[in-house]
Amino acid sequence: MDEIDRRIINSLQEGFPICDAPYQQVAIQLGLTEQALIDRLQVLLADGTLTRFGPLYHAELMGGALTLAAVKAPPERFVEVTGIINAFPEVAHNYARNHALNMWFVIATETPGQIRQTITAIEKQTGLPVINMPKINEYFVGLKLEA
Amino acid sequence: MVALDEIDLAIMRATQAGLPLTPQPYQNIAGQLGLTAEVVMTRMAAMQEKGVIRRIGAVPNHYKLGYRFNGMTVWNVPDEVIDELGQKVGQLEFVSHCYHRPRHLPEWPYNLFAMVHGKSQTDVDKQIQQIADLLGDFNLGSDVLYSTKILKKTGFRSRGYNINPPSYSYSAI
């Protein structure tokens, strides 16, 4: 990653135009050719520097439901519990965290009612109580990480 | 929930993996769907206006940019002032997500969640101090949880689609 890549990453976190030739428009602002910008984006995506490039959709506004949930997995059962929870297609993200509540996961379902069903199923299969922490209010989502 | 029709959903399905890396990406999407570029651009601009598209742009891998310290900071603040405080915390430039979530007493007294990101523990410690200073006397207790391992990371499913899937799955924390 060089200085040009950094400028591309910083600029494209701010947004991307909706117009006939958007790469050309951004390339001009960055002092690059359109093809150079496209080539570099390809590399940044292929090597994993960027995880996504494109529109980011708001799952809940599309009718879906999300919640953050956590369990206390006994250390000797950690791998087993991870397997059970990850096997649910409704579990989108799962992180081990350094706390008594040591497993934190995001459940995403097509309808709000399915959140409760998924939690009940996870509790039944793991034998562990699931702490459900659905958002009550969203104050901010987004971030610009300076490359 | 925002009303979306079949055209919006078709555009969403065509772009869920990302925008084409071609000189005229909207034209390409239109071609795939049998629409005009004008319709695709108008619909996408409208979805962005309504917030269905949060933004169009690049999502970097935190770790690849050197942001290895990603903390979930959690705070216990009085419910009467949480909205005002949450807005302020969410405006700090290093906070990526800021939410009000329910407490689960006695084991979980925290109701304000803010994700912070830094390149060193010192950076993150300073960020946490900045949030603590902002909350002042309303900070009734706090904790910071660091991810020690990513156990799973996929997109969100909705209406049969996988929303915002990472195009690259990383196994490092």
Image (tube, rainbow, N blue to C red):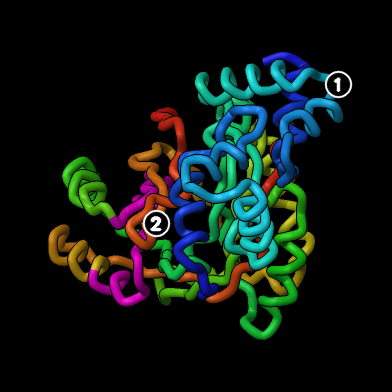
Query: Which residue occupies the extreme bottom position in the image?
Result: B80
Specify the amino acid type for callout 2: Val
A133 up-or-down from A141: above or below: below
Q: Residue at 60% across / 68% down in the picture?
A: A138
Q: Nearer the viewer, residue B62 or B27?
A: B27
Q: Is residue A109 magenta?
A: yes
Chain ID, mark 1: A
- In the rendered image, which residue does mark 1 sit on? A31
SS assignment at label 1: loop
Q: Which residues are magenta?
A: A90-117
Q: Nearer the viewer, residue A36 or B145?
A: A36
Kind of element beneath mark 2 = strand
Chain designation of label 2: A
Quadrant in the rendering for residue A33:
top right
Q: Nearer the viewer, mark 1 or mark 2?
A: 1
Dot 2 corresponds to which residue?
A: A106
